[in-house]
Amino acid sequence: MTDYDFHALQARWQPVWESLDLFGAGRPTGGARRYLVDMFAYPSGDLHMGHAEAYAIGDALARYWFQRGYDVLHPVGWDAFGLPAENAAIRRNQHPADWTYANIATQAASFRRYGPSFDWRTRLHTSDESYYRWTQWLFLRFQRRGLAYRRLSAVNWCPADGTVLANEQVIAGRCERCDTEVTKRDLTQWFFKITAYADRLLDDMTKLEGHWPAPVLTQQRNWIGRSRGAYLNFGTIEVFTTRPDTVSGATFLVVAPDSALADELCAPGQRPSFETYRTEVRRKSELDRMATDRPKTGVFLGRYAPHPFTGAPVPIWTADYVLAAYGTGAIMAVPAHDQRDLDFARTFDLPVIPVAEDVPDADGPARDAAIERVIAEAEARGVGRGGVSYRLRDWLLSRQRFWGCPIPIVHCGRCGEVPVPDEQLPVRLPDLRGAALTPAGVSPLAAARDWVEVPCPACGGPAERDTDTMDTFVDSSWYFLRYPNPDYADGPFDPEALRTWLPVDQYVGGNEHAILHLLYARFFTKVLKDLGLVDFDEPFRALLNQGQVILNGAAMSKSKGNMVDLGEQLDTYGVDAMRLTMLFAGPPEDDIDWADVSPAGSVRFLGRALRLAGEVRSAPGADPATGDQALRRATHRLVRVITELIEAHRLNVAVARTMELVNAARKQIDDGHAGDPAVRETVEAVTIVLSLFAPYLAEEMWSRLGHEPGVAHAGWPAVDPALAAESTVVCAVQVNGKLRDRIEVPADITEADLTALALASPAAAGRAVTRTIVRPPKLVNLVVQP
Ligand code: ANZ
Ligand code: ZN
């Protein structure tokens, strides 16, 4: 019934495409440009279903831009450093580099089969020396500006694995790998001072409004968490409160148990119970501590502080529901207004005093006025000030792990932290193998003594390299800047190429990156702007979050054993049917349940489309104007609609409309009109539209239609507005109020188009029109000099 052999098509066209170098963007023509970035892949194993979906979406958009004649940059690269690769390699007794580059080779081969419109010259791997050299260079620019600094910090610690864990590796308070309860440990760590950019990260989001998914913007706002309120002094203890208007109801203070303040304040008699409590608290995750429904626990510290307005002694407690890292790490408790404070007061029998001039919590304006009054009074008395607090913390970037970018700092007993000079970059990873890679409490790099011990770059004395590596989110915070010229040797990115391509017009990726990666990339861009290295302050103009591919309502995971293997699916249904299924399943943002879709149905549809191409009997270039007008109107209307749908990223509906086009052509052929040039027009339009969704098949159709290979650049089908109009109406053309002509116009014609048509009509010929009165679509009155 069909001769659709997708394996044969893939084998035929893949080498042709490679030889034609269809998507090289190295040579922009000077026309309008579009830069599309798919979030780059993490090389753990082969490509999976999630990649197939994301890249089908990104590629459809990139190919659309190619067809519209833009200069398009659609790059490819790998986020190649990182902990999962390191762990997987250690488990397999392999070196992380060997494991990672083997996976990259596998994924690259899979990409070539999948056929995205990548410019392979952009290819980069963040673990290459030629890349991480510049990650280090950038780190040093941040450090010089005071935006990278070191301080003691409590980190997640897995006692069983003897290693520090990233927050993402702590699942419900336990180590993701061995399920041991995670504790806190104090280590000196590197941080990026992202908090210095909190306001700009928040305020610049107005530029992204309407171009980024609203939930992502909301999540970023909440993550940054700017609260307005006041800092009030209870003696030497400063608290942050969003409700200074309730200060008269403050009956006790609570200090975070893991703060230095609690430790300082604790009276000698209370120390044993305080320390026992603190040990307990350190085992708990922040999330647990913040949960409102937990029974309240805490310890009296044996001290009092004076109330800022009355001077009355207020008892100081410590309790886990106050976090060290938010506000000042200390609160005034107002049990009459705050539920957690009330629960605590009831548990420990502390007084509850209603606020005198009781402000209804819900009455915004009255409350705001009361807040302003109290702030003014506190400022007048010198016991406080209005201020803001942020939930955002500085970005902890040190990792005590091997497979990452080494931190280019040397520690010297005499000179302190000394940056490695630029000309000595990159600081290469030491050549460690086998057991030396296994983390054991300190970074594995510390074991490479001949690597660690170096002369101080400043004084030449004995010194040691920093043995931490950087969080992989550092690598991914700037890769999109290097893509346009990944071989650039004079800096992290080529300023000329940057001017050509940046910022990114469309970023495509999963919403697991709604916060960290996207926030970090935005932060980097702003710092680079301040350093004068780029001239824009938002990296991604538009963002599309594709959904996930799930199965029977559940996320696919190795541990659940419900993975659908992409390779097997591609073997069974072919690349094009897989891509089409991904796009047709629903809006790009929605999850796709693989149990609900039909790749076999996609195969059948593609087979029907292919058959059309073999049946067209008119010659290439035949004038469709002589063909069936009803088919032409259907075609132009559908192409117009498909264009609008693609522009709006409603790819699933665009696929559905393409199916209608196929049906329309089919009917005309079945009615015996295979030689009608209008049929060719329709089938060519189908082919070009399908080149976005099913490129191998489209190339084959294009060839059967008698064209040279390279359907990717055939050019988007031109829409004739008259044919594409939903319907036409007859418009009266009057001259000085008298009917002179009737013209057929699209029912939805614009005022400008109708004016132009009327002025070109015979009724206007040779007359000096002084004014036009246009009532689209039915009436035009031309006012002329008598
Ligand atoms: C007194 C008060 C009365 C408060 C009241 C709230 C309601 P957001 O909006 O999230 O910024 N708080 C301050 N620092 C804290 C910390 N380190 N750990 C836990 N809670 C802390 O929350 C600000 C409010 O959270 C602050 O205002 C403080 O409690 C508490 F009717 O002060 B409030
Ligand atoms: Zn020195």
Image: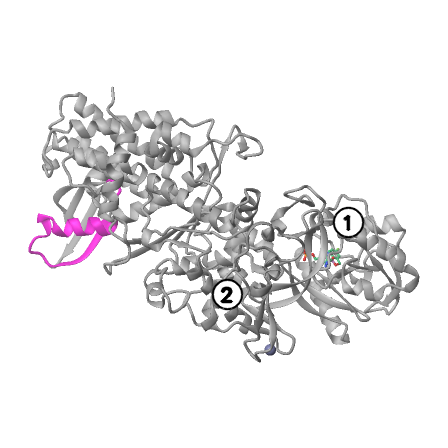
Which quarter of the figure is the N terminus placed in?
A: top left
- In the image, the segment drawn in magenta is 747-774
Q: Residues within 10 Å of mark 1 (few under 14, many from 20)?
A: some
User: Which residue position is annotated with label 2?
Assistant: 427
Which SS class for mark 2?
loop
Q: Is residue 252 left or right of residue 193?
A: right
x then y, percent, for residue 617: 11, 29
Residue lying furthest bottom: 459
Residue at 54 percent across and 34 percent down: it is: 558
**Mark seen at residue 339:** 1
Residue nearer the viewer, 557 or 324: 557
Mark 2 lies within 8 Å of ligand 2 (Cβ measured): no
Q: Can residue 307 be seen at all in this image of the molecule?
A: yes
Vertical placement of residue 492 versus 64, above or below: below
> Cα distance, mark 2 to mark 1?
53 Å
Indicate yes or no whether the magenta region holds residue 769.
yes
Q: Is residue 601 left or right of residue 470?
A: left
Give the x, y percent position of residue 751. 25, 50
Residue 258 falls in image quadrant: bottom right
Left or right, residue 617 beside residue 53? left
The amino acid on which the numbered mark 2 sits, given as a three-letter code, is: Val
